Image (spheres, coloured by chain):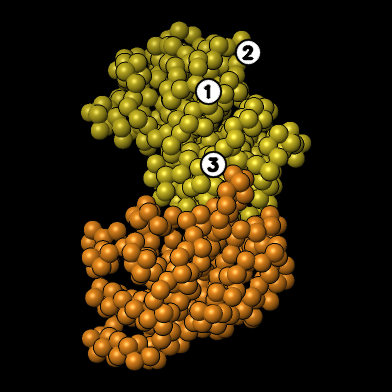
Chain colours: A yellow, B orange
């Protein structure tokens, strides 16, 4: 997703109000953007608290700052600057965190972002976006340049199945139709689940929904119709359970007087074995990988 | 630059000190010491230096009272509004709130944010080719915060010539003197070590403050270290820890008023 991100940022350089701040990241990637933006490209150094405060000052002056770093250095390190300087003033700063979830793999726990949107969504007015495919970025970014609120974008690796047609980016998308469980997935891991689940037999094939924007607004009627039919909901997210999509959707369903007969949540469990590895390794340890999901679906008796 | 005020400085200073004391007394609010220490800086800046293109950030948000009284002295806040200070439903919270009044660009109160915000405003002016300067007042204890030093590096690296920050060097912080808590030694030397042009002044001398704020050609940002007295202008408060927190009793209030009136 990073290449698509860089290309779109270069295209956005024609917007005179656009300012890009990086926390010393972008070697072998952002050089074209640096050249295109000139003085509006700012390497703020390894100093994320200042970077976010500066971005707030820029936004307060009518500019459109985007703040970029590895995800935890965008939301965790400068959390109070995001809260006080950006969100209290409803400033349209765009925080871009690269490597959502276990994206930085064997680089280790400090570089993972397992509680990013759950943490940030407690802040006033902020919206979090979790694009899943490269194609999602162009429509999303067009919208973010017009937004009147703070935004957080969690970037990951696009995992589009071969030959699949991706529906246009939106908060809710149904990737796969099926009579089995309803799966609600957030972010790029939906791609692998989509690929594995589409080969399942008719009876076990799930209705796979992809969530791209948080917090949840209204649950779409088509999703509710799928749920009314299936009565079984599985939420899958590369994020800790606390403050995650599973909790949000459960609360929303209960408030609306709907309780599925079965409710399962697969969330990031941290580091259960104490060992480190690739993003795939960590997903597997948390049961978030396509094989685990498909095994679960297969193991369920068809009602 | 604004129109020079017709009222003599001593009268303006006295009026503002009295109004600040009254506001804090009536609202039963502490933090008076650190408000009195920076009041003269805020008055000189707002009354005699800042023009319509200039911007201000109060990084030491606990001196909100001094800022409100300064805005009152300019006719931008009314007596009735000051009477609501710290009360339910007020726009004038103990630390400046977000979007509460037009003259306050940012909610501050958590230390170590204001200078970064001011740097963003200054950088925006440069990128947009806009005139005017950005002024920021920090406390001295605030320089315990690592984010201040992040910003110092940034502001100097980007040569933010249109940024001036003033340090209210009253020597006292939350639970001790700055020397006892985390001794930075002479802070002006630290700024100079970062190649930031730094002037040291008596923070209760209008002439020295004005002199330090006069435009110069040195590469920015510009630092002014203002030696002040916590509780400046009220002898029994000066340099005393408790006035970081305590509200005034009636007897103390009347004594303070008497001193300021006689000064």
* Residue at point 56%, 55% (across, down): B132
* Residue at point 68%, 37% (across, down): A37
Q: Which residue is mark 1?
A: A139
- Which chain letter matches label 1? A
User: Looking at the image, which is closer to me, B193 or A292?
Assistant: B193
Considering the numbered disc 1 on the image, is that residue within a helix, a strand or a loop? Answer: helix
Q: Is residue A97 visible?
A: no
Q: Which residue is mark 2?
A: A162
Q: Quadrant of residue B73?
A: bottom left
Considering the numbered disc 3 on the image, is that residue within a helix, a strand or a loop? Answer: loop
Mark 1 or mark 3, whichever is nearer to me: 3
Circles 2, 3 touching at the beta carbon (< 8 Å): no
Circles 1, 3 touching at the beta carbon (< 8 Å): no
User: Looking at the image, which is closer to me, A114 or A77?
Assistant: A77
Q: CA distance from mark 1 to mark 3?
A: 20 Å
Q: Going from the N terminus, do you reach mark 1 or mark 2 first?
A: 1
Q: CA distance from mark 1 to mark 2?
A: 22 Å
Q: Position of residue B131 (x, y in %)?
A: 57, 52
Q: Residues within 10 Å of mark 1 (few under 14, many from 20)?
A: few
Q: Which residue is mark 3?
A: A63
């Amino acid at each position: 997703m990073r290449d698509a991100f860089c290309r779109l940022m270069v295209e956005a350089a024609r917007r005179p109000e656009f300012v890009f701040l990086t926390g010393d990241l972008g070697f072998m990637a952002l050089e074209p953007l640096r050249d295109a933006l000139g003085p509006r490209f700012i390497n703020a150094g390894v100093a994320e608290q200042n970077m976010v405060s500066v971005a707030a000052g820029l936004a307060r002056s009518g500019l459109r700052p985007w703040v970029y770093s590895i995800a935890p250095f965008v939301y965790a390190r400068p959390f109070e600057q995001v809260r006080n300087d950006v969100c209290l003033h409803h400033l349209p700063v765009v925080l871009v965190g690269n490597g959502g979830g276990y994206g930085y793999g064997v680089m280790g726990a400090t570089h993972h972002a397992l509680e990013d949107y759950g943490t940030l969504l407690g802040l006033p007015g902020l919206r979090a976006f979790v694009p899943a495919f490269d194609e999602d970025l162009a429509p999303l970014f067009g919208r973010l340049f017009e937004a009147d609120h703070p935004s957080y974008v969690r970037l990951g690796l696009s995992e589009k199945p071969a030959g699949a047609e991706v529906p246009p980016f939106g908060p809710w998308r149904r990737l796969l139709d099926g009579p089995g469980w309803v799966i609600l997935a957030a972010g790029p891991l939906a791609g692998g689940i989509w690929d594995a689940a589409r080969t399942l037999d008719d009876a076990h094939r799930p209705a796979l929904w992809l969530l791209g924007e948080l917090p949840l607004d209204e649950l779409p009627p088509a999703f509710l119709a799928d749920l009314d039919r299936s009565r079984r909901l599985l939420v899958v997210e590369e994020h800790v359970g606390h403050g995650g999509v599973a909790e949000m959707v459960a609360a929303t369903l209960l408030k609306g007087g709907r309780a599925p007969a079965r409710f399962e949540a697969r969330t990031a469990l941290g580091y259960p074995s104490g060992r480190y590895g690739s993003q795939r390794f960590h997903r597997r340890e948390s049961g978030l990988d396509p094989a685990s999901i498909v095994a679960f679906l297969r193991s369920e008796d068809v009602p | 630059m604004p129109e020079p005020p017709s009222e003599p400085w001593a009268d303006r200073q006295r009026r503002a000190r009295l109004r600040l004391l009254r506001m804090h007394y009536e609202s039963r609010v502490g933090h008076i010491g650190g408000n009195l220490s920076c009041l003269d800086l805020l008055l000189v800046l707002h009354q005699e230096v800042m023009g319509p293109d200039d911007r201000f950030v109060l990084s030491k948000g606990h001196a909100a009272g001094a800022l409100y009284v300064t805005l009152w002295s300019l006719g931008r806040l009314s007596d009735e509004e000051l009477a609501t200070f710290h009360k339910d439903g007020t726009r004038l919270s103990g630390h400046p709130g977000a979007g509460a009044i037009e003259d306050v660009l940012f909610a501050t109160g958590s230390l170590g944010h204001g200078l970064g915000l001011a740097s963003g405003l200054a950088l925006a002016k440069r990128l947009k080719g806009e005139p005017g300067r950005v002024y920021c007042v920090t406390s001295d204890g605030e320089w315990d915060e690592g984010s201040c030093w992040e910003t110092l590096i940034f502001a100097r690296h980007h040569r933010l010539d249109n940024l001036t920050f003033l340090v209210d060097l009253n020597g006292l912080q939350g639970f001790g003197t700055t020397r006892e808590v985390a001794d930075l030694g002479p802070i002006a030397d630290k700024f100079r070590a970062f190649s930031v042009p730094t002037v040291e002044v008596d923070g209760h001398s209008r002439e020295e403050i004005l002199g330090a704020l006069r435009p110069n050609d040195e590469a920015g940002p510009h630092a002014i270290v203002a030696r002040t007295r916590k509780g400046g202008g009220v002898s029994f408060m000066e340099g005393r820890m408790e006035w970081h927190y305590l509200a005034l009793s009636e007897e103390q209030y009347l004594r303070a008023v008497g001193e300021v009136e006689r000064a």
